[in-house]
Amino acid sequence: MARLPPPPPSSEITPEARYLRRREILKSAGLFVGTAAALGTGLVALTGRGRRATVTAEPLPPGLALPTPGPPPAPPGSAAARDPFKTDEPRTPYEDVTTYNNFYELGLDKEDPARNTKTLKPRPWTVVFEGEIKKPQRIDIDTLLKWFPLEERVYRMRCVETWSMVIPWLGFPLGKLIERLEPTSRAKYVAFTTLMDPEQLPFQLTDVLEWPYREGLRLDEAKHPLTMLAAGLYGKSLPGQNGAPLRLVVPWKYGFKGIKSIVRIALVEKEPETSWNMAAPREYGFYANVNPEVAHPRWSQAMERRIGDLDKRPTLMFNGYAEEVAHLYAGMDLRMFY
Amino acid sequence: MAASEIPRGAGKLGWLSPAIVTGGLAPAVVLVIRAARRDLGANPIAEAMNQLGLLALVLLVLSLAATPLQIATGWKWPIRIRKTLGLLGFFYVCAHFLVYAVLDQSLALGAIAADITKRPFILVGFVAFVLLVPLAATSTAKALKRMGFARWKRLHRLAYVAAILGIVHFVMRVKKDLTEPAIYGALLGGLFLIRIMDVALKRRDKRGSMRG
């Protein structure tokens, strides 16, 4: 029979209460960690949106060449320095231009369109020209892009939400297209429509806005040399989130006027209905000219944050293009026609 | 060993409040790390403001869920973390306001004053913030004692008003899609419903016992 080991001295025996408390502490520690982790993870998941999508730049479609660079810009301050088509302000990084987008058809958060753009197929693509023109037609996008040489334009873009970017667009002046379509004397406005296809633009299944997205310009605004149709940016194809394969760029107006993924351009007699104006007429006017003096009902428009900056900067009248476009609105009350 | 050796207040649920504080502050830590790593997207200030505002609203709604949860389940622990959740919510409200005033508006007092007076969206958010200040200031046991429970309780009903204003502020901020604020509005509505039903039932019981 084995002999029992001698009992430990009483000084080494853990008091029962302390022994029980040790178990209690371990259990409490476990509950503490579990609860803290659950609440912390839940809150982070609720608020912290995931990482940005990685965007790879696609080359231009075959047959399209980059414009040859013009002469170097005149030294700043000289009389010839002002070139509204090429601001020398620092360009917003490609990554920011292509991952911070409002394109509700591809999602409501700024990072959503870049993430969800895979469903949008920019080829094959046809655009319809109709209405008050002598040459209504339906045309393939690649044919259209060969009608006019591509030009690079570095424009400021000011969003109605008080942020702004500087973007090198690639495209052609809308005025040249309008000229070629030969408007009739009844044409007073241009109406644009985005593709309507929930399979490619899944958020068209929601009723956030009345789809398809619609925009419009007065004919003189559309024919202004600053107004362009863009098919690329940074020398590359336009990514889906930026409105592939064809979008409008009107640099003196708030960004939402720049309708994306255009399938229809019609010249019309009456002011066309426009999506944001239909959704909230008090907040988004038909003209939507950048104007630091006319506040949005919910925020001032006097300042803007250039993406990449911490400080805000004053917003310029007509986004800094007043010298070029102010005459279009001579005599108009811009508080009424905002 | 005498029970007095166990730290005061620890009790069985001593871990609960520190766990809520730790978990509740975790998103603030994540936010600071992401900001330092330039991982908040193209417009980090707007993103920080949005996240802090949402955290404030969620924590305030959670703190207002404590009493209804206790009513519905009989559990005592929700009441133990009500104050902690409320103060965490206030912490995020302050952070949200500070990011707006310091980083977004660069402390341009004129522009901030114009925002508050001219734009209902900012005004509503600001009023919610102001309403929460006396609640945070009287959140100690000492203040409760000094004020007396009835008065303290009446004052702290402002938390409902602040939460409703928070949701209104959210509704006014979104450009078009109301889904998210509607979810929080519905949650808060549900919580109110539990309280109202509870009060109604208690009143009926009281009348019944008086008749009997």
Image (spheres, coloured by chain):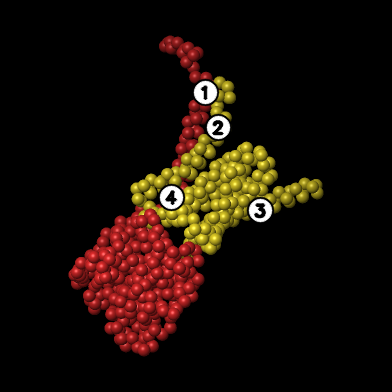
Disc 1: which residue: A18
Looking at marks 2 and 3 on the same chain, the residue that comes earlier in the sequence is marked by 2
- Same chain for labels 2 and 3? Say yes or no: yes
Residue beneath label 4, please? A45
Q: Does mark 1 fall on the same chain as mark 2? A: no
Number of marks in picture: 4
Amino acid type for the residue under numbered disc 1:
Arg
The answer, for residue A98, to whether it is visible in the render is no
Q: Amino acid at mark 3?
A: Ile
User: Could you confirm whether marks 1 and 3 are on the same chain?
Assistant: no
* Labelled disc at residue B10: 2
Numbered tag placed on residue B196 in the rendering = 3
Q: CA distance from mark 2 to mark 3?
A: 33 Å
Q: Is residue A73 left or right of residue B94?
A: left
Note the chain letter of the yellow one. B
Quarter of the image holding residue B123? bottom right
Asked if the residues shown at circle 1 and circle 3 are in contact, with their CB atoms under 8 angstroms apart, the answer is no
Task: Please state the horizontal and vertical placement of residue A30, each as a whole percent of the image.
Answer: 47, 35
Q: Nearer the viewer, residue A45 or A186?
A: A186
Chain letter of disc 3 in the image: B
